[in-house]
Image (cartoon, grey):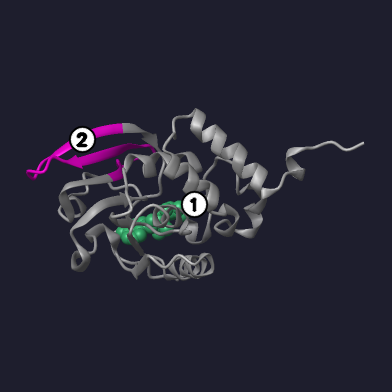
Amino acid sequence: MTSSTPDDDTAETRAARLILALREQGVTDMKVLGALEKTPREMFTPDLFKERSWEDSALPIACGQTISQPYIVGLMSQALTLDRRSRVLEIGTGSGYQTAILSRMARLVYTVERYRTLLGEAEERFRKLGLTNVITKFGDGGIGWAEQAPFDRIMVTAAAPDEPKALLAQLKPDGVLVAPVGKGPVQQLIRYAGDGAGGFHKETLCEVRFVPLLDGVAREL
Ligand code: SAH
C-alpha cells in the first residue's frame, strides 16, 4: 500500500501548498506568488533546516541572523507595489531570499549587507540562479546607497529603531519604502508612500519580529 505523507512530498508540492496558504492569508498579488513559487527556498536555508525550507517560518542562518518567514516576504513584496521598471534598494541581504524574490519583479535590485560571509554566500546563490539584475554591496545599509539614489522602492529587512530618515531621503518623491520600525523584539511593519511633494503617507501593516538594523559593518566575518 502506498500512502502520501508530507515527508514524501517533493519541493514542488510543498511550494504549491505554501503558496496556497499565503494566498489565503492575503498575499494575492500574482507577481509575488509567482516569484515565491519559482524561487527554490531550499537553496537559501542551512543544511540543518533544509527539510523545513517550505514551511511558513523564519529559520536561522549564519552569523546569528534569520531568513524571513515566507508570509512576511510575500506581504512586504506586495506592499512595495513593484513593477518591471522599478529600481529597488534592499537593506539586509541575509540569505538573499528576499533579494531573489525582488529581482524577479523589478528592473534592478541594489542590496546591502553588513556581514561579508552572508553577502558572499548570497552572491553565489544569485549566480547559480542566473539573477543578473542584482547589485550587491558590503556596508552599512542604514545610511543607504547615496551613489545610486534616488530609488523607486526601498525595502528594509532588519528592524530600524526609529523612522528610517536617511533611507526616506533616498526615495523618489512618489516612491514607497517598507520597513519594520521599533526598538523592541516586536516591531511595526510600516509602509511609507511618498506624496510627490516631500511628505509621506504612513500606514502600519502589522506586527513583525526582525533582527535589529545595526550601525556599521560587522567586525567578525
Ligand atoms: N532579507 C533577508 C533577511 C535577513 S535578516 C533574508 O530573506 O534572508 C536581516 C539582515 O540584515 C541580516 O543579515 C543582518 O546582518 C542585516 N543587517 C542588519 N543591519 C544592517 C545594516 N546596517 N546594513 C546592512 N545589513 C544589515
Amino acid on which disc 2 is placed: Lys
Question: Which of these two is toward me, 116 or 82?
Answer: 82
Q: Is residue 214 visible?
A: no
Q: Is residue 104 left or right of residue 57?
A: left
Q: Is 212 located above or below residue 95 in the figure?
A: above
Q: Residue 215, how many percent across, how many down?
A: 28, 60
Segment colored magenta: 178-204
Q: Image quadrant for the C terminus?
A: bottom left
Amino acid on which disc 1 is placed: Ile
Residue 67: image tag:
1
Instruction: State the SS at label 2.
Output: strand
Q: Are marks 1 and 2 in contact (CB under 8 Å)?
A: no
Residue receiving disc 2: 202
Between the residue at mark 1 and the residue at mark 2, the CA separation in whole angstroms equals: 26 Å
Picture residue at 22% right of the left edge, 49% below the top: 164
Picture residue at 33% right of the left edge, 67% below the top: 217
